[in-house]
Image (cartoon, rainbow, N blue to C red):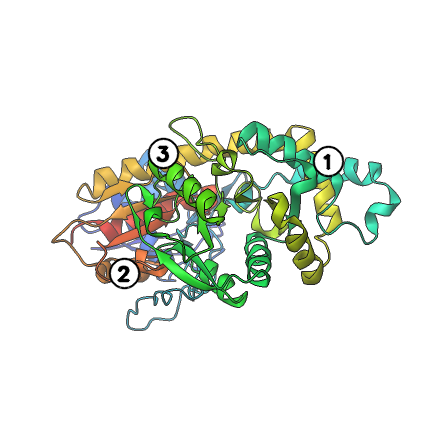
Amino acid sequence: MNEWATPRRGSGSYDLLLDLAGQRTRAGLEEVLRTAVRDGRLAPGTRLPSSRVLSHDLGLARNTVADAYGQLVAEGWLTARQGSGTTVADRPSLPERRPARRVPDAPRGGPAEVSPHRTGLPYALWPGTPDLSSFPRTAWLRAARRALTAAPSEAFGYGDPRGRPELRAALAGYLARVRGVRTDPEHLVVCTGYAQAVGLVARALHARGARRAAVEAVGMPDTPTVLRAAGLDPVPLPVDAEGARVAELGRGVPAVVLTPAHQFPMGVCLSPARRTAVVAWARSTGGVIVEDDYDGEFRYDRQPVAALQALAPDHVVYAGTASKSLAPGLRLAWLAVPPHLLDAVVREKRLADHQSAVTDQLTLAEFIAGGSYDRHVRRMRMRYRARRDRVVELVGQRAPDVRVSGIAAGLHVLLDLPPGGASLDAVLDRALRLGLSVPGLPAFGAAPSHPPALVVGYAAPPDHAFSAALDLLCRALEPQ
């Protein structure tokens, strides 16, 4: 039956019509309140009755109401402030009610047409983005003050296209210590993001006569697009449980772009045999390997896999970025370039934008040199591992037929849907109706014949929204 929660005089809260029929429990009250907020009946800023008042009006124990409020605050549906009571949290607007429509997958080989920023949904579990709310603002500001105070005046003029020497020196030491990269500051080039880094190498190769480059058939859609823009024809390289099938490279392809430490999005590591094989291919053909080490710092269950570049520094261009470890908005990435390619890559950098922003380079150099970068990465590794464990635990409890893979590293997992269960389209439609944006594997180039799977990024939601997003994911996965 419908029950009114009527506010006492002076409470400042609204009458609530709550249908608790058959759900006179904490879980039932939580679900009724979630539904009221999701449907817009309780608008952002609405003040709710106190737990004492609501428990009296509904005939529930006060602890039941208090615990329900606490859970919804933790999930981000409500906010509570000492002396101000409990109110409905500000949340992104829900899309207009219309027939459910699945978000289209990106065309194979083309740029991703859909992102969590374009769906208008309140929750998103997309891969590729860190928890932006955890950006170390205070430590970054301290590093910026120190760096700018110590910087020589010439630092703010036109400088070396490779980047500031302070940052290249700091990166050379860090990459050798943490990723096993064999390089020196003279062979490092600071770039404005990973896309620019790959584009510089691609244009340098094209200027030398290259017309093709292999790329993992299932991967980040932007990579083949960048290759095409540089004049190179992308050649898809199949991916299986051991990573890219590098034996299919042959002599007709002068370059290959790989994610060997943690394949995106399948989550596998390039096997030792294939690491050896691709290095042998490069040495025998003079080929170039571009190593995308996009999340190499985030490995959870054993020691990180060293960079492939350490096996063949003269044939591997190592590409790293601060987009996952810190924030993509910094637009900072770097290349460790073999000597025979350095002049060509530097020339392309000069033509592209001459140099990356100096102040952020100086700040990152200080951030690394002072130990703040290591401390931040270590802290985020613990946080992301806890989130990964929570995804594995909750999916195992609520959707036990769904297989979770690719969990050893990175900021996402792969959820393989069970044979004979709901189709990928049905699961994606259900997630959209619940208010959750999450991509399927076809968005990253997987063929229609590939077993259906979701690519779930668990890093991006802030703490207050993570539990709610994960609950929606499990509701979309649960057998109907």
Q: Give 91 or 99, whichever is nearer the viewer.
A: 99
> Horizontally, is 312 left or right of 280 in the view?
right
Residue 128, numbered label: none
Residue assigned mark 1? 142
Q: Nearer the viewer, mark 1 or mark 3?
A: 3
Name the residue rendered at 69%, 30% in the picture: 369
Q: Is residue 141 visible?
A: no
> Horizontally, is 191 left or right of 3 in the view?
right
Residue 307 point in image, percent of width and height: 49, 36
Real-space CA distance between mark 1 and mark 3, rounded to the nearest whole angstrom? 42 Å
How many residues crowd mark 1 within 10 Å: few (<14), some (14–19), many (20+)? few
Q: Give 3 or 426, whichever is nearer the viewer.
A: 426
Residue 447, numbered label: 2
Q: Give 159 or 287, whichever is nearer the viewer.
A: 287
Real-space CA distance between mark 3 and mark 2, rounded to the nearest whole angstrom? 26 Å
Q: Earlier in the sequence, mark 1 or mark 2?
A: 1
Q: Nearer the viewer, mark 3 or mark 2?
A: 3
Circle 1 — which element?
helix
- Above or below for 310 versus 225: above
Residue 330 point in image, percent of width and height: 63, 49
Position of the C terminus, as image quadrant, is bottom left
Q: Give 338 or 321, whichever is nearer the viewer.
A: 338
What residue type is disc 1 on? Arg
Residue farthest along the right direction in this orientation: 153
Q: Nearer the viewer, mark 1 or mark 2?
A: 2
How many residues crowd mark 3 within 10 Å: few (<14), some (14–19), many (20+)? few
What residue type is disc 2 on? Ala
Circle 2 — which element?
loop
What residue type is disc 3 on? Pro
> Horizontally, is 429 left or right of 274 in the view?
left
Residue assigned mark 3? 272
- Above or below for 114 versus 451: below
